[in-house]
């Protein structure tokens, strides 16, 4: 334990905090790439982290109640989390509940956040496992391997005082967690998992490795039918995650933020982060659709092509009119002179009266 002024700085807590920070950073980066506003992860973390810590502690107390309620034990130790004792599945369950509340408040699907968290959570676990080294806990059977961890006599199991070095199961799990993070990240980039399937993949890979490291440990644990309770939990969680991964389908989702800051969930590729790209694309689609309208043979009064089409009809009408004038018989000049003579005679007779 270190001292930071008047405050005690415990290595176990420091490892947990560093892991949380790394998980938040990875999740924030991935959420922004899918259109989430900046620092969305902080809005979620303020709910998920406290719920996760409480859930992890509750899980530990439920699975190992004799550590706090047996004769000679002090139940106040339940609140001393710096001494170790956080169960991963309680952390996942409690954190999921807190994240669900935050996502409901922000209008973001929980499955989207879970997929964004999928590579970050095992990184946090990998760092947090080193807190077990500082506390000298969660190690395996005695061994003389070069990478064995030395355990002080005060932290050795009863009846094993003669052994100084043990299997560093926390190290094995830390390395496995980093491999899980890498595999989930690579497969997610290739297959674009959606609807929580990326998180289900993380769960399957993590519990597969956790099952074997759990069997190597020799610290106290309750058993059921010859297996540790945590092993049974790992089996059930693996089956549930596998069923979810295989049965659930659906497109990956993105977020689009409008001018008022409202979030809209859209299929991946149909919107851009922080813009009204969907509206622009709709307008472009409408314009393109106008060009594709079939010709129904109707005239558009404002169309230049239609005016040009009318000109041949007008020119055709002019010769027709001329043809009709040519067909009428021409006036006879003799008839015109006779008409004028009759008019003059009528005038002279009028004056004679």
Image: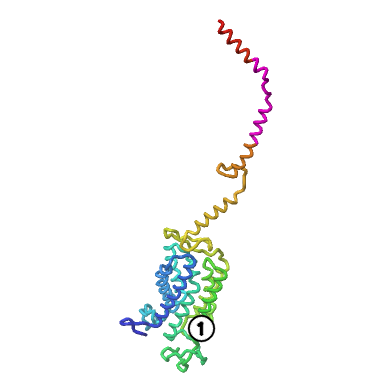
Residue found 55% across the figure and 43% down from its top: 302
Residue found 68% across the figure and 17% down from its top: 334
Task: Name the side, left or right, on which 326 lies relative to 33.
Answer: right
Please indicate, yes or no, whether residue 196 appears anywhere in the rendered image.
yes
x%, y% of residue 126? 47, 79
Q: Residue furthest left?
A: 6
Residue found 65% across the figure and 15% down from its top: 338
User: Is residue 319 within the magenta segment?
Assistant: yes
Q: Quadrant of residue 344?
A: top right
How packed mark 1 is, by other alpha carbons closer than 10 Å (few <14, some 14-19, many 20 or more), is: some
> Which is more toward the observer, 307 or 237?
307
Relative to 348, say whether 199 is above or below. below
User: Is residue 236 within the magenta segment?
Assistant: no
Task: Name the side, left or right, on which 312 lies relative to 238.
Answer: right
Relative to 263, say whether 180 is above or below. below
Quadrant, the C terminus: top right
> Which is more toward the observer, 195 or 62?
195
Disc 1: which residue: 172
Question: Start and end of the magenta stretch?
Answer: 316-338
x%, y% of residue 200? 53, 71
x%, y% of residue 284? 53, 55
Main SS, magenta region, reads helix
């Amino acid at each position: 334990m270190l001292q930071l002024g008047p405050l005690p700085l415990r290595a176990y807590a420091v490892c947990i905090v560093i892991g949380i920070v790394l998980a938040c950073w990875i999740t924030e980066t991935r959420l922004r790439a899918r259109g989430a506003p900046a620092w969305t992860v902080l809005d979620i973390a303020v709910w998920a982290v406290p719920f996760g810590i409480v859930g992890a502690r509750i899980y530990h107390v439920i699975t190992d109640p004799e550590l706090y309620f047996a004769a000679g034990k002090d139940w106040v130790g339940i609140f001393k989390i710096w001494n170790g004792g956080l169960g991963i599945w309680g952390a996942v369950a409690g954190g999921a509940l807190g994240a669900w509340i935050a996502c409901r408040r922000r209008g973001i699907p929980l499955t989207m956040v879970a997929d964004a968290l999928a590579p970050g959570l095992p990184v946090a676990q990998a760092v947090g496992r080193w807190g077990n080294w500082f506390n000298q806990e969660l190690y395996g059977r005695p061994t003389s391997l070069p990478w064995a961890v030395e355990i002080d006599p005060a932290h050795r199991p009863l009846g094993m005082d003669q052994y100084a070095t043990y299997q560093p199961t926390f190290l094995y799990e830390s390395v496995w967690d980093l491999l899980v993070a890498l595999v989930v990240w690579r497969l997610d980039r290739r297959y674009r998992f959606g609807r929580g399937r990326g998180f289900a993949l993380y769960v399957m890979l993590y519990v597969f490795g956790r099952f074997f490291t759990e069997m190597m440990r020799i610290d106290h644990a309750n058993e059921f039918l010859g297996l540790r309770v945590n092993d049974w939990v790992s089996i059930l969680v693996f089956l549930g995650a596998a069923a979810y991964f295989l049965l659930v389908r659906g497109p990956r989702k993105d977020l689009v933020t409008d001018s008022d800051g409202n979030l809209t969930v859209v299929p991946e590729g149909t919107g851009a982060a922080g813009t009204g790209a969907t509206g622009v694309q709709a307008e472009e689609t409408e314009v393109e659709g106008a060009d594709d309208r079939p010709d129904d043979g109707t005239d558009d009064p404002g169309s230049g092509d239609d005016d040009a089409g009318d000109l041949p009809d007008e020119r055709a009408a002019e010769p027709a009119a001329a043809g009709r004038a040519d067909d009428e018989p021409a006036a006879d000049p003799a008839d015109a002179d006779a008409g004028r003579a009759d008019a003059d005679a009528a005038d002279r007779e009028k004056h004679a009266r």
